[in-house]
């Protein structure tokens, strides 16, 4: 596939980008190199090669879920701009009667 100005213009329109002439030439060269690389990859014999699904053999490496208190209510409310005895106060977002 040949990369020409028409393709660059179409791609730049789709991407909502604007390029000057020197930038268009650089993009044409970059896209040509990318397509050449893809063509080389298509020539590689992959018969008998299993698709790579995972990068390693580890499966579901998770930490145990332990409930623990890391901050007290008092510490959490200490710097709150508006607070009640046990709760954060926030401005009303929905007024009653609105859906």
Image (spheres, helix red, strand yellow):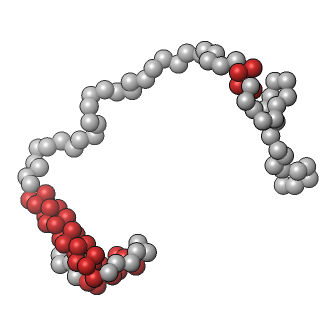
Place of residue 47 in the rendered image (x, y in percent of width and height, measured from the top left) = 10, 48
Q: Residue 45, can we see it?
A: yes
Residue at the spot x=34%, y=27% of the render?
59
Q: Position of residue 38 (x, y in %)?
A: 17, 62
User: Which of these two is toward me, 38 or 75?
Assistant: 75
Instruction: Determine if residue 14 is in view.
Output: no
Q: Is residue 40 left or right of residue 78?
A: left
Which corner quadrant holds the C terminus? bottom right
In this rendering, the answer to whether 88 lies above or below 12 is: above
- Image check: 78 left or right of 50? right
Q: Examine the image and state in which quarter residue 36 appears.
A: bottom left
Image location (x, y in percent) of residue 5: 26, 83
Identify the residue at image location x=26%, y=36%.
Answer: 55
Point out residue 43 in the picture as x, y percentages from the top left corner: 8, 59
* Residue farthest toward the bottom in the current orientation of the protein: 6
In depth, the one of 29 and 54 nearer the eye is: 29
Query: How many numbered marks have been drawn onto this rendered protein structure?
Result: 0
Q: Is residue 79 left or right of residue 35?
A: right
Residue 15 is drawn in which quadrant? bottom left
At 22% from the left and 78% from the top, the residue drawn is 25
Q: Nearer the viewer, residue 38 or 48?
A: 38
Quarter holding the N terminus? bottom left
Q: Quadrant of residue 4?
A: bottom left
Relative to 95, is 37 above or below? below
Describe residue 63's horizontal placement relative to residue 95 as left or right.
Answer: left
* Residue shown at the point (65%, 19%) measured from the top left: 71
């Amino acid at each position: 596939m040949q990369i020409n100005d028409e393709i660059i213009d179409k791609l730049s329109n789709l991407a909502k980008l604007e390029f000057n002439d020197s930038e268009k030439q650089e993009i044409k060269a970059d896209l040509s190199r990318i397509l050449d690389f893809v063509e080389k990859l298509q020539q590689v014999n992959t018969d008998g090669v299993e698709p790579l699904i995972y990068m390693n053999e580890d499966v579901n490496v998770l930490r145990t879920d332990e409930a623990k208190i890391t901050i007290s209510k008092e510490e959490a409310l200490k710097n709150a701009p508006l607070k009640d005895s046990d709760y954060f106060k926030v401005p009303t977002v929905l007024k009653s009667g609105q859906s």
